[in-house]
Image: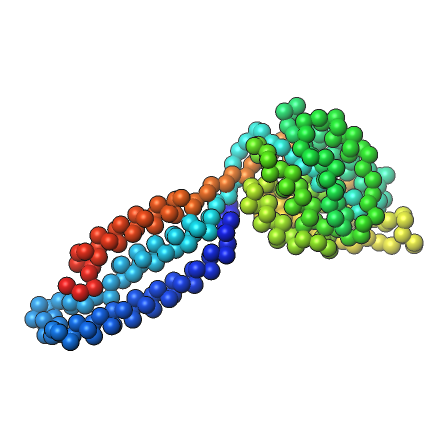
Amino acid sequence: MAVVFSNPLYLWFLLSVPLLIILHFISLKSLKRKALTFANFDAISRVTGQSLFTKNITLLSIRILILICIIFAISGTTLIYTGRSSDFDFILAIDSSSSMSATDFQPNRLEAAKESAVGFVDSLSSEAKIGLVTFSGTAFVESSLIEELGRIKSLVKNMQLRQVGGTNLGEAITTSVNLLLQSQKSKVIILLTDGRSNVGIPIQQAIDYANKNTVLVYTIGVATEEGGFIPELEGGDALLRLDEQSLSQIATSTGGKYFRAVDKESLTNAYQQISSSTIRRVSTDLSLFFMVIAFSLLFIEWLLSTTKFKILP
């Protein structure tokens, strides 16, 4: 479960809450001083045994709640939580950087990823739409959402390594989210990589964008425990380690799950678990709810201010 804001800048108005409290007590002090100019309220209080001045904490609390509710309303507060669905659209986002040529999978990581991805596409229902994004230092849209599963399989089989340096997970996610914006079904990204994000859009920014658009992201980390070697590199230099922490963060923050694939079997199993999952992301706009609460509290505050909660009798 997560809470996101479509207009987060308005949250700065929450800093006005302490100001409201300060102004409340300054106003009380000023009114008491003026009242004592015309009547001896201290003497009346001793006779009646009641304090004729009150700090009006009840009214102050209501006014604070009104202010907070209005701020949350104009900030576009949205509650996002997981639910159940049987109808999904998918984007496959597959790492095509040079490290995917490592030979710890046979014949290499990219070919193993392509084979498992084709098997995943075969497992989908004919009603599902699927798109394909490849990425390295930047993201490339190979296909938007389409129903022609055979076309996607062909594109996956023909994937080639990209010569653009780096791994840009942030752009891969945001590009994939953009392809899903028009989908009326539950939206899922399957992000497969063997590296760490070292260029481009910050991962947290991409996570926030996915959450804002109720997109669930599954991540698959492809690398054996021993690691692999890139044949193209002189001397077969060892690869950098897989950034499991970031992949796990992406998945858990968006309602998905992280899978570590150490061989072809675990890679295939990851895709099978994703295809059989019924989890989806659901969003509820709370702006109207907070506005209704604010107006209700405003009416209550007005009623109370005409009764014993008046600042002065």
Q: Which residue is pictured at 74% across the width and 31% down the height?
A: 152
Quarter containing the C terminus: bottom left
- 167 vs 301, nearest the viewer: 301
Percent position of residue 220, x then y: 70, 43
Q: Residue 58 at x, y = what percent?
A: 26, 59
Tell me if 244 is positioned left or right of 9 in this view.
Answer: right
Q: Is residue 16 above or below residue 298?
A: below
The outermost residue toward the right is 234
Q: Quadrant of residue 65?
A: bottom left
Taking 176 as reference, is 285 left or right? left
Q: Which residue is at 69% across, 42% downward?
A: 191
User: Does residue 115 show up?
Assistant: no
Which residue of the protein is positioned furthest toward the left in this rendering? 47
Residue at horizontal 42 percent and vertical 49 percent from the top? 73
Colour basis:
rainbow
Residue 264 in which image quadrant: top right
Total labels: the figure holds 0
Tell me: residue 134, above or below residue 227. above
Q: Residue 181's spot in the image, x, y percent?
A: 60, 38
User: How far across and how far down the image is residue 2, in percent?
Assistant: 51, 47
Which residue is depicted at the point 17% across and 72% down?
35
Of residues 239 and 77, the one nearer the viewer is 77
